[in-house]
Amino acid sequence: MAEINGDEILAKDLNAPSMFANILRARAENGFVVLDLGYVPPLESSEVSLLQQEQIRVSQRVIMPAEVAQMLSHMVNQLLPGDADDFNPVAPPRA
């Protein structure tokens, strides 16, 4: 796959929907990476147990080839302040 710098791509994004997300689930399936994004409003300490019992609504799903996911990871690491090697998200263990 040829590499293209994102700054070299012309894109019309004026009407692209934007949604805030503060939760993320990522998984790999058949050479693709699937990102599910959602939003959970700030919780009171008494609401945490309720959240663990209810499903969280996914508001966006992004599916991309593994190569594009690698490019995304590289670009995110370049955008983060400090040492890019410090950014190593860890998925929670599966129950």
Image (cartoon, rainbow, N blue to C red):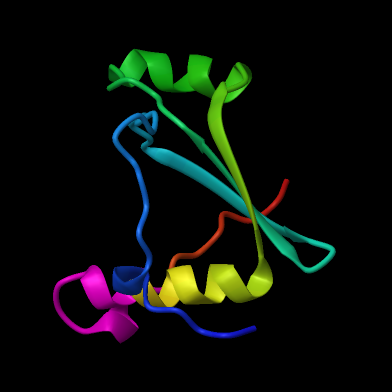
Residue at image point 84% right, 64% down: 30
Asked whether the viewer can see residue 87, the reply is no
Return the x and y of residue 77 as percentages of the image width and height. Answer: 32, 75
In the image, taking residue 82 as reference, residue 48 lies left or right, namely right
Q: Quadrant of residue 16?
A: top left
Q: Is residue 6 magenta?
A: no
Residue at image point 62% right, 20% down: 55
**Between residues 59 and 24, which one lies in front from this camera angle?**
59
Q: Does the magenta stretch include residue 78?
A: yes
In the image, taking residue 39 as reference, residue 83 lies left or right, namely left
Highlighted magenta segment, given as a residue range: 76-88
Q: In which quarter of the image is residue 12?
A: top left
Vertical order, 46 against 21 (above or below) = above
Return the x and y of residue 59 as percentages of the image width and height. Answer: 52, 26
Q: Which residue lies furthest to the left in this view?
A: 81
In the image, taking residue 9 as reference, residue 63 lies left or right, namely right
Quadrant the N terminus occupies: bottom right
Asked whether the viewer can see residue 39, the reply is yes
Return the x and y of residue 71 as percentages of the image width and height. Answer: 48, 75
Residue at image point 50% right, 84% down: 3
Counting the numbered discs, the total is 0
**Between residues 87 and 59, which one lies in front from this camera angle?**
59
Return the x and y of residue 90 as percentages of the image width and height. Answer: 50, 64
